[in-house]
Image (cartoon, helix red, strand yellow):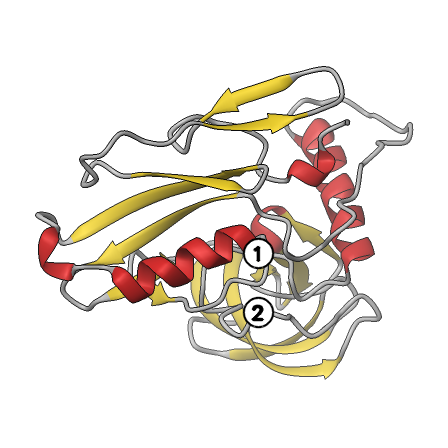
Amino acid sequence: MKAENNQTIDVKIEKIVPNGFGLAFAEGLTVFVALAASGDRLRVKINQKKGKTAFAEIIEILEPSKDRTEPRCPYFGVCGGCNFQQLKYEAQMQAKVEIVRDCLSRIGKINYEREIAIIGSPKPYEYRSRAQWHIDRRSRKIGYFQRNSHEIVDVEVCPILTTEMQTILTELRETIVWESFSEQIIEIEAAQGGQDVSVYSTEIVEPTDEISFQTQENRYFYDANTFFQGNQFLIEP
């Protein structure tokens, strides 16, 4: 008998696919398991089933993968900002390489067997130099969207933010005047350049500060409303 919604089944994760899902095959189904690691043996509950495809959540880790680690973020799994913190950093990079290879094959019909190079960050945490924060004036929450939802997770500390970005988030939480916003949900963009941080929102009247990033040969000028590399440790000097 095939598994149905809310049923519990045991699976083994074959690999990691986009959005951090673990891929497994069981009970005649292709099962996508949130927050899994390749090699995990898991007891999962099916939340949604469509035809021969199912989406499931972990109920119990029967046998953890060698790639699994304890996430540093206390909000991980609830917050939708990160998908791979359950994996050791080396496993995260390998998973991303295999995701690219799979997309080339499955979507592009390209059988690419050569090495796919990936440049790792020297800092797996405290590297993120830009962010988009959501503010709910009614519930007085500041943070990121909850996984698979537009509910806001109230985030005090984000481990992937640089020290300068975390300082801005903390100051925002301490000084915000809730009654000053006209909309219930507000988005705030923040970006770092050097030691400076630029902040932008449609609710902020003051001009957005221009910031810059210096390499050996060039200086790049931008602000929070402009795209720039979110991990400045990856920029060539």
Q: Is residue 140 left or right of residue 68?
A: left
Q: In the structure shown, which secondary structural element does the residue marked by tag 2 occupy?
A: loop
Q: Residue furthest right?
A: 114
| Location of residue 23 (image quadrant) | bottom right
Q: Amino acid at mark 1?
A: Thr
Quarter occupied by the N terminus:
bottom right
Q: Position of residue 60 (x, y in %)?
A: 62, 84
**In this picture, is 131 found above or below 36?**
above
Q: What residue does disc 2 label?
A: 73
Q: Position of residue 235 (x, y in %)?
A: 71, 30
- Between 52 and 224, the one lying in front of the other is 224
Disc number placed over residue 20 in the picture, else none: none
Work out whether residue 91 or residue 186 is closer to the camera in this orientation and state it: 186
Secondary structure under tag 1 reads helix
The single residue placed furthest to the top in the displayed view is 217
- Kindly tell me whether residue 119 is visible in this rendering: yes
Q: Position of residue 41 (x, y in %)?
A: 74, 75
**What amino acid does circle 2 point to?**
Cys
- Where residue 163 is drawn, which disc sits there? 1
Q: Residue at x 81, y 36 (%)?
A: 118
Residue 147 visible in this rendered orientation of the protein = no
x, y (%) of residue 81? 49, 55
Which numbered disc flags the more N-terminal residue, 2 or 1? 2
The residue under the point 18% across, 41% down is: 203
Residue at 89% from the left image edge and 29% from the top image edge: 113
